[in-house]
Amino acid sequence: MKRGFLMAHQQHDFKALNKHAGFTLLEVLVAVSISAMVGIAAVQLLSNVSNIGRATEERSAELAEMQRFNQVLGRDIGQFIDRPIRDEYGDTLSELMLGSGDYPIEFTIAGWRNIPITDDPRSTLQRVAYRTEEIDSEPCEPALERLAAAEGLDPDEYVGDGECFIRYYWPVLDQADDTEPKTQVLLDQIDDVEFTITASTKDSTDGSISLNTYDFWPPLTPTVGEAPAAIRLRFTTTHFGEIERVWLIAHDGGLW
């Protein structure tokens, strides 16, 4: 009898052991579902972090480009000098031209540094001009390549909107027949570029100052004693919207 009791007890323990030896199908399905949800959440989190990092890099590059644009244009205007030039036909061009030539704005600047060890020093004055070009034009090629690379496309496949803002500069002031300007891309995806000049006139009797705004310079009917005092630039970009900047014009001989 004792032996039968022990065998019955052992069988009961074996059944209890078998009952808790593995997982049920429902438990397995619940575990798989939880693992899947955790995996999906992790993938989405990593994707969001990656997208945020890429967007931050793109916006930082756009901001750096805007800062470089402001720095270059502001430096050129700050170094403006009253020095007319001669074009390839021998005609005299004003030291500052707005809307009256091949470029929306063109002027002479100082501060063009020479290489210290050069045996053939050049003038430290430089003629510069600014103009927008279509994004698929030859001067805009560096901008097109950058924009295409950001989209993971070849430059031939990229179809972009807007224009790019080009800085032109000449190796000499008084140009010859074969003098060609060099180009520098300052900003891309830009539209509606508008330059205006604010000119100052000082009254010789009472010393009062009057201001006039021009869309072109020199004016067709110049006023005695009138000189450009500031340049205003308005433009629109894809990422920053409408922007307006104003730079004061320095004169090497005074305004009046």
Image (tube, rainbow, N blue to C red):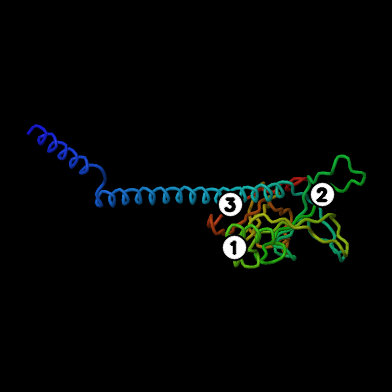
Give whichever of discs 2 and 1 has the lower sequence position: 2
State the separation of the CA atoms marked 2 and 3.
31 Å
SS for dot 2 = loop
Give whichever of discs 1 and 3 has the lower sequence position: 3
Image quarter hosting the N terminus: top left
- Are the residues tagged 2 and 1 within 8 Å (C-beta)? no
- Are the residues tagged 2 and 3 within 8 Å (C-beta)? no
- The total number of labels drawn is 3
Q: Nearer the viewer, mark 1 or mark 3?
A: 3
Residue 176 % position (x, y):
88, 62
**Of 185 and 224, which appears nearest the observer?**
185
Farthest top residue?
Answer: 2
Specify whether 242 is left or right of 41: right
Image quadrant of residue 7? Answer: top left
Give whichever of discs 2 and 3 has the lower sequence position: 3
Residue 191 numbered tag: 1
Specify whether 90 is left or right of 240: right
- Are the residues tagged 1 and 3 within 8 Å (C-beta)? no
Amino acid type assigned to the residue bearing label 3 in the image: Glu
Residue drawn at (89%, 43%), measured in percent from left and top? 118
* Figure check: 4 above or below 152: above
Residue drawn at (22%, 43%), measured in percent from left and top? 18
Farthest right residue?
Answer: 119
Specify whether 175 is left or right of 79: right
Specify whether 29 is left or right of 194: left
Image quadrant of residue 215? Answer: bottom right
Residue 166 % position (x, y):
69, 58
Residue 125 numbered tag: 2
State the separation of the CA atoms marked 2 and 1.
30 Å
Amino acid type assigned to the residue bearing label 2 in the image: Leu
SS for dot 1 = strand
